[in-house]
Image (cartoon, grey):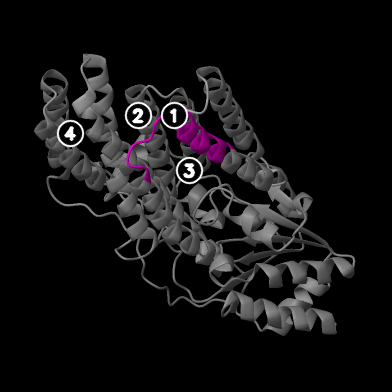
Amino acid sequence: MSLLTPEWTAGLYLFAAVCFILALKGLSSPKTARRGNLLGAFGALVALVTVFLSMRVDNLPWILGTIAVGSAIAVPVSRRVQMTQMPQLVALFNGVGGAAAALVALLELQHSSEWWSALAIAFTILVGSVSFAGSCVTFAKLQELMTTRPVTFPGLPVAMGLVVLGALAAAAWLVMSGSFVAALVLMALGLVVGVLLVLPVGGADVPIVISLLNAFTGLTVAASGLVLGNVLLLVAGTLVGASGTILTREMARAMGRSVGGIMFGAFKGGSTAGSTTQSDRPVRSASAEDVAILLGYAQRVIVVPGYGLAVAQAQHTMAELASALEAKGIEVSFAIHPVAGRMPGHMNVLLAEANVPTESLREMDAINPEFKNADVALVVGANDVVNPAAKTTPGSPIYGMPILDVAAAKQVVFLKRSMRPGFAGIENELLFEPQTTLLFGDAKDSLTKVLGAVKAL
């Protein structure tokens, strides 16, 4: 017996859907992102409670026990994960969502009697399996459990084509017969497609694949809504699928690449990563005191944060250094590249955690014309997003990617742990230019020394 009338159920589902839409709107700005996130979580809670109150729920102890076990795993993991590992966590969450949708569709097969329902089930099983397997591979790449470089082998395009054809044949078999065996074959082939799809992607393109797989998961959730006759799942899945697709296209545009080129470039013999060989060419290095002098007597400083800043957990020290420079009358801005770090908005979230004012964060198109007026460009842990090869070297894996025009600054200071290339695996010619100075060491340790020297000026 349900405790809610159909009218109340529909109204609460509508309320939850509005919460999801407003949550996406809130996530479009750093100022409202936290509120948007909380609003989306509240909408999900309303939807969950509505499900329990609007229908007779069988096997309630099993359901509650599963929720308890999942929460016991998820809460500690989410609280302990570092900001540098957030993309891996997103990849795992996304993969679990795709797998859940595929399993639900598999179980609903026995209740399906219409061809369109079988078609939705086949779509959900196939795309959910692709999303799960692909997300697991992206997690392994970002976590460096396997190489981040593209993994290819002779005959990969042929193998991929045969597996896709097999999956489509299994999907047709499932729709025509409703066979549980066909569903299991389809799921297995979907897992293989997911692995083969993501293995050839490497370098800085992996975060874009995470966004694309997120869109896939959204589509599977929407299809699950059709299978279960649940309007809220249909709305929520459509929102995730649409937003994930838009984000994927915007990230690809920021890289100066097409989505097709990112996903299938390696199939044609290309590569999304270069050599990881460390250069032994001479560079100009300096001490923390030398860098402090450059900064302390500048009028305009532009900071370019990157993944190295996140790895070193140096955002608070960086914020303190910016405040110390501003106290001396120096103008400080932060230049944010759309794909700096390992996911969109990575640097915005990192610096917001350190209470850097939102107005100090400048997007690439807005800040690029100002580099020529900067006395010092301070690059902390970034590499590929400032690499001139994106403009000057056809054939480079990042050629055509819009970059921050750091080379236009009067002086460039790189804080680097070593001379190893960035995530794309290619050498940065800017490191060898006469206006460039390098300060080697852990970013947090180096910034702490620079901060002390700036205060002593």
Residue range highlighted in magenta: 43-60
Residue 109 within the segment the image draws in magenta: no
Viewport quadrant of the C terminus: bottom right
For marks 2 and 3, give the CA distance.
Answer: 39 Å
Q: Residue furthest front?
A: 1
Which type of secondary structure does the marked residue at label 4 adopt?
Answer: helix
Q: Is residue 424 left or right of residue 406?
A: left
Mark 1 touches mark 2? (CB < 8 Å): yes
Relative height, residue 441 to residue 310 (above, below): below
Which type of secondary structure does the marked residue at label 2 adopt?
Answer: helix
Of 9 and 376, the residue lying toward us: 9
Q: Residue 440, how many percent across, how many down?
A: 57, 79
* Of pointers 2 and 3, the one earlier in the residue sequence: 2
Q: Residue at x 32, y 58 (%)?
A: 149
- Disc 3 marks which residue? 400
For label 1, count other residues whose C-alpha is less than 10 Å away and answer few (under 14), some (14-19) or many (20+).
many
Q: Nearer the viewer, mark 3 or mark 1?
A: 1
* Of pointers 1 and 2, the one earlier in the residue sequence: 2
- Disc 1 marks which residue? 233
Viewport quadrant of the N terminus: top left
The type of residue carrying mark 1 is: Leu
The type of residue carrying mark 2 is: Ser
Q: Residue at x 12, y 45 (%)?
A: 155
